[in-house]
Amino acid sequence: MNLHGIVSNAIGTVNPFITAILKRSTGYTTSADGTQVPTYTTLTGAVQVQATSGKDIEHLNNLNIQGVFRTLYINGNWTGVVRADSKGGDVFTFPQIPGATAQNWKAVNVKETWPDWSSIIVVLQ
């Protein structure tokens, strides 16, 4: 059952969805000097951006991940780092403050993932 689909319209009236550039990691290529260069498939879609809870920030701090965090709710199945698939994490481009310049945010923790939607913690790059 897609609970996100059921409640997203109601939530969107309080905290509107914003359009973001979605870069799904497809792995990497190796440059001539041997460095790995990430590769992405680029899409555009709507994301629900919310504050990250104190409990989630504490968890990330215990993993030694620091920075400016947001929690995204997004349709589809999105991921962070998947070493078995040689993928380095999805990147989302949206403004930190509505009307500001868009910035890159990298997936660092997947809270929930379902076939129809995902909840992801991203960090400002």
Image (tube, grey):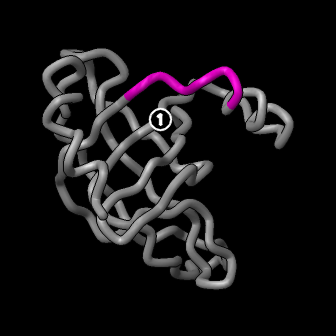
The residue located at (47%, 35%) in the rendering is 71
Q: Nearer the viewer, residue 114 or 92?
A: 114
Q: Is residue 62 left or right of residue 53?
A: right
Image quarter for residue 102? top left
Q: Locate the N terminus by quadrant.
A: bottom left
Q: Nearer the viewer, residue 97 or 50?
A: 50
Mark 1, other Cα within 10 Å: few <14 / some 14–19 / many ≥20: many
Q: Position of residue 18 (x, y in %)?
A: 19, 33
Which residue is labeled 1 in the image?
71
Q: Is residue 87 above or below residue 19?
A: below
For badge 1, the amino acid type reads Thr
Q: Nearer the viewer, residue 34 or 93?
A: 93
Q: Is residue 122 above or below residue 67?
A: below
| Residue 52 included in the magenta stretch of the image | yes
The residue segment tinted magenta is: 50-55
Q: Which residue reaches farthest front? A: 1
Q: Is residue 48 left or right of residue 110?
A: left
Q: Position of residue 87 (x, y in %)?
A: 56, 74
The residue located at (28%, 59%) in the rendering is 2
Q: Is residue 8 above or below residue 88?
A: above
The residue located at (53%, 37%) in the rendering is 125
